[in-house]
Image (cartoon, coloured by chain):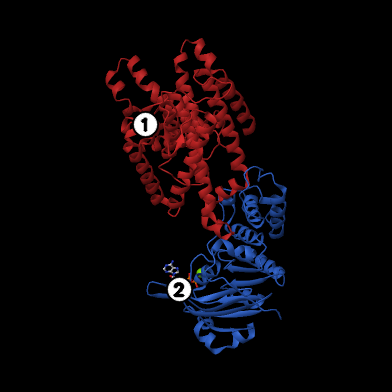
Chain colours: A blue, B red
């Protein structure tokens, strides 16, 4: 963690009409850490993720990734730098098989796709890595099922496998456990634990037990601003945080 | 199982198409060979539309524009060959190699321009803007007084020339179109199974996800649009040759609608579906009036479209996934 920060967000703002969803937000994520972002519903967490991934562009402010200013960079270029996100609302290819879902991610990671001749579905260099990501996350037995037939929790896992297939340096997970059962959540927590250290992670999560168990750093987002950042103990004991956010949980 | 059936279907289809001139001759209906050739040509056009419609999820309501451009390019080159005049300083030609390639190239170029603008929109806007561009091309052709305006023009020089073949002979021309369709279909199958094809399908199913995976989707969709336009342009060049006649009617908006119906009727997103769609559509269009005449129903004979429309709707309702899927599922139980 002595490296330069992997992500520096400065003064980021985004309004929807009169609503300031993100309002002068500052955030620094160190290389290799798991940085949780907590905050009440509507605080602007997903709007932040959309701007980091380039799905929407900020009104003002800057985003630097590994020292590079990516504020205006096209969405599709960012994953190739290693900046990869998952979606709060599951976003997969429902008609394709589970394997195909991951294989297309592997394909995106292996050069351009203006390749018109060779059969991609019989291409081991796509399906083998895809299968290994499915094994990693425990979905390999469902590889040939259409993705829409999977249970909600399994679709969340698939979503994560697709993100991993892009070989992220910084993985941004927007409530990966949303809607999961207790068992699946526990499984996901231990999986994220196993990922820790191999890459940097920004984790948006509501469950405080999960957040305090996994995080190196926590930032608290309220009304589009980071009101506190620190290690779990600091956040737990921060009076501002307690009144603004943690208090509501009690 | 489904593969086996597909193979049987292909072999059967190949055999029928390959012996079509003989079959028609045997039943004394050789004059129908032109209709059979037309089915092959429209199958190419419908297949090309299916690339963007069925695989890429782009509902283009202007695909006949590229068919028309292809027909006009080959027709105009032939026109100047016959007149011994030039166009943009270039001599005309009746060489298939040059004229057909020019048709493909120029319709690809048109598709590049139209696609580059249209693909900035999606949904209903995309449908409307592709229709609008096709209408612009329609009125452009209507305004070409030199080439007959809205009447179009005859290719007095006859069909294009290929060394060693006599395209003026209907049977030879039929086989050239059959070969073109076979090559096109094989190329199409290769394409949709390639990496490019996977991207196209991904864009259809969930384009935002493709972008988040790092895919610049616009350029892939544009290339698909250009390939589809080129395919339709090639079909147009063949159609100009078949009838030795070119007119703005090829680009009429109902023609774009016909192509959409052929794809939906035959089976959207399947390699062979559009062929069956084109065959069913064109055969109904041709034979419905004749059937009504034979039944002694002159009113329906004249207004056969009144039956044609509901009939298409019924077919689509019953064969939900298209004729091709129905053929593949025929006589099989639901959860087989
Ligand atoms: N596309 C949008 N248009 C208008 N308002 C939006 C849009 N996206 C989000 N918002 C609003 O911005 C605020 C922040 O939303 P969001 O970032 O989704 O919060 P969080 O993820 O923290 O729950 C909310 O009040 C939400 O209603
Ligand atoms: Mg959210």
| Quarter location, residue B257 | top left
Quarter of the C terminus of chain B within the rendering: top right
Which residue position holds label 1? B247
Q: Is residue B267 visible?
A: no
Residue A80 versus residue A104: which sits nearer the camera? A80
Instruction: State if disc 2 and disc 1 touch (CB < 8 Å).
Output: no
Same chain, labels 1 and 2: no
Residue B124 versus residue B5: which sits nearer the camera? B124
Residue B140 vs B218, above or below: the answer is: above
Which of the four quarters of the rendered structure image does ligand 1 lie in? bottom left
Quarter of the N terminus of chain B within the rendering: top right
The numbered mark at residue A68 is none
- Give the percent coordinates (x, y) of residue A247: 52, 83
- Give the percent coordinates (x, y) of residue B39: 47, 26
Please, what secondary structure does the residue beneath circle 1 have? loop
Q: CA distance from mark 1 to mark 2?
A: 52 Å
Residue B242 vs A144, above or below: the answer is: above
- Give the percent coordinates (x, y) of residue A135: 71, 56
Q: In screen coordinates, is A191 left or right of B182? A: right
**How crowded is the residue under tag 2: few (<14 C-alpha within 10 Å), some, or many (20+)?**
some
Q: In screen coordinates, is A44 left or right of B154? A: right
Q: Is residue A52 visible?
A: yes
The numbered mark at residue A59 is 2
**How crowded is the residue under tag 1: few (<14 C-alpha within 10 Å), some, or many (20+)?**
many
């Amino acid at each position: 963690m002595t490296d330069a920060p992997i992500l520096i967000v400065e003064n980021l703002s985004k309004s929807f009409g009169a609503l300031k969803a993100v309002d002068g937000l500052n955030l620094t994520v160190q290389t290799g850490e798991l940085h949780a972002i907590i905050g009440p519903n509507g605080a602007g967490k997903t709007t932040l993720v959309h701007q980091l991934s380039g799905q929407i562009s900020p009104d003002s402010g800057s985003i630097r990734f590994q020292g590079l200013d990516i504020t205006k960079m096209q969405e599709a270029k960012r994953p190739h730098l290693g900046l990869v996100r998952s979606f709060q609302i599951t976003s997969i290819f429902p008609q394709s098989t589970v394997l195909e879902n991951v294989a297309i991610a592997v394909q995106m990671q292996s050069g351009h796709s203006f390749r018109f001749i060779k059969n991609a579905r019989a291409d081991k260099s796509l399906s083998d890595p895809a299968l290994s990501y499915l094994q990693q996350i425990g979905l390999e037995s469902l590889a040939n099922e259409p993705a829409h037939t999977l249970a909600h929790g399994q679709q969340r896992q698939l979503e994560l496998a697709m993100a991993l297939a892009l070989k992220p340096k910084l993985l941004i997970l927007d409530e990966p456990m949303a809607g999961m059962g207790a068992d699946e959540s526990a499984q996901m927590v231990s999986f994220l634990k196993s990922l820790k250290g191999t890459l940097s992670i920004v984790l948006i999560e509501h469950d405080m037990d999960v957040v305090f168990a996994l995080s190196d750093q926590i930032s608290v987002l309220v009304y589009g601003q980071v009101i506190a950042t620190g290690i779990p103990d600091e956040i737990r004991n921060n009076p501002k945080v307690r009144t603004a956010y943690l208090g509501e949980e009690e | 199982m489904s593969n086996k059936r597909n193979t049987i279907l292909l072999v059967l289809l190949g055999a029928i198409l390959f012996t079509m001139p003989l079959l028609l001759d045997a039943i004394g209906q050789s004059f129908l060979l032109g209709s059979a050739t037309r089915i092959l040509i429209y199958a190419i056009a419908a297949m090309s539309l299916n690339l963007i419609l069925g695989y890429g999820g782009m509902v283009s309501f202007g695909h006949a524009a590229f068919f028309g451009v292809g027909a006009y390019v080959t027709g105009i080159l032939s026109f100047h060959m016959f007149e011994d005049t030039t166009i943009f300083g270039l001599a005309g030609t009746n060489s298939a190699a040059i004229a057909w390639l020019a048709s493909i190239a120029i319709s690809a170029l048109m598709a590049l321009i139209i696609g580059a603008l249209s693909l900035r929109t999606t949904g209903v806007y995309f449908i409307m803007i592709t229709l609008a561009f096709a209408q612009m091309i329609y009125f452009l052709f209507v305004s070409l007084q030199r080439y007959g305006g809205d009447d179009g023009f005859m290719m007095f020089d006859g069909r294009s020339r290929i060394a060693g073949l006599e395209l003026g002979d209907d049977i030879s021309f039929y086989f050239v179109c059959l070969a073109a369709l076979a090559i096109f279909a094989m190329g199409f199958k290769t394409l949709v199974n390639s990496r490019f094809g996977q991207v196209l399908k991904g864009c259809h199913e969930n384009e935002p996800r493709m972008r988040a995976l790092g895919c610049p989707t616009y350029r892939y969709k544009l290339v698909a649009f250009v390939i589809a336009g080129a395919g339709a342009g090639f079909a147009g060049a063949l159609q100009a040759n078949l009838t030795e006649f070119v007119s703005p009617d090829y680009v009429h908006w109902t023609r774009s609608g016909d192509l959409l119906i052929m794809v939906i009727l035959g089976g959207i997103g399947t390699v062979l579906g559009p062929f069956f769609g084109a065959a069913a559509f064109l055969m109904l269009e041709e034979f419905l009036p004749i059937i009504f005449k034979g039944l002694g129903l002159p009113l329906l004979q004249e207004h056969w479209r009144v039956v044609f429309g509901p009939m298409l709707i019924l077919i689509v309702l019953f064969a939900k996934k298209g004729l091709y899927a129905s053929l593949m599922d025929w006589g099989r139980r639901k959860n087989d």
